[in-house]
Amino acid sequence: MNLATEAISTTILMSMKEWLVTGQQKITQKQTRLPRLYIARFFILSIALLASCAVSGVARADKLPQPPLQTVLLDIAGTTLLTELAVTPVERQRGLSYRPLLERNAGMLFVYQQERPLIFTMRETSIPLSIAFINEQLEIIEILTMEPFAKENYPSSRPARYALEVNAGWFKQNGITAGAKITLQPDTE
């Protein structure tokens, strides 16, 4: 739980205890049943407490990396790269966020329906990355280096249909520059 949720939960619990004690004192004083008002307050506060716990659980689940996605092998200038495919809007939005590492010859290919200006961010990504923006002909049009947790955006300078994220420096280490063509390796299974 974050601090705000914890504070709300503590306040709710204290209020529930206070109302129950007050109700019990009235029972002792009047020797009557617990008033309906106190039962209703207890019920409402119980629901509020459960709701605050549920909300904090959802927030923590959002901070988890997405499970591994479907993979393909790409060939870029004679170098093979095992690549996860981020195809849906949810997969593209989550990307490599919250992952502690990326294997040496691995990456993530972001697939869009058509060429368009693309913008990427590193707000929740701890791995230094390089990104290649790729056109419909599977040709790299530019490569950028992206810093972990950077608040700035990384836009493509021209419309692109794909974006390929790899470990920072991977393209340079493999002699891959703008203009390189990418091919999908045939499935060997």
Image (tube, rainbow, N blue to C red):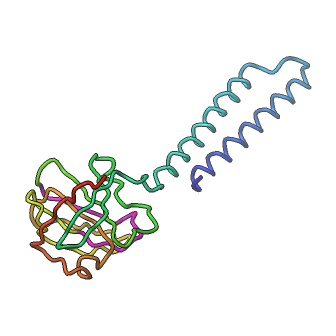
Give left or right: position of 34 versus 41. Answer: right
Question: Along the line of sight, which residue is nearer the eye, 189 or 178?
Answer: 189
User: Residue 177 in magenta?
Assistant: no
Q: How many marks?
A: 0
Would you place residue 153 above or below residue 92 in this image?
A: below
Q: Give residue 12's position: percent from left, percent from top.
A: 67, 41
Magenta segment: 116-131
At horizontal 16% and vertical 62% (from top left) the residue drawn is 183
At horizontal 28% and vertical 46% (from top left) the residue drawn is 88
Question: Along the line of sight, which residue is nearer the eye, 52 or 121?
Answer: 121
Would you place residue 149 above or below residue 88 in this image?
A: below
Q: Give residue 65's position: percent from left, percent from top.
A: 44, 56
Question: Along the line of sight, which residue is nearer the eye, 8 or 175?
Answer: 175
Location of residue 188 by image quarter = bottom left
Would you place residue 71 above or below residue 171 in this image?
A: above
At horizontal 20% and vertical 81% (from top left) the residue drawn is 175
User: Residue 119 in magenta?
Assistant: yes
Give left or right: position of 145 versus 24. Answer: left
Residue furthest to the front in view is 189
Location of residue 185 by image quarter = bottom left
Location of residue 68 by image quarter = bottom left
At horizontal 39% and vertical 68% (from top left) the residue drawn is 102
Q: Give residue 108's position: percent from left, percent from top.
A: 30, 61
Question: Along the line of sight, which residue is nearer the eye, 26 or 70?
Answer: 70
Q: Give residue 144's position: percent from left, percent from top.
A: 22, 74
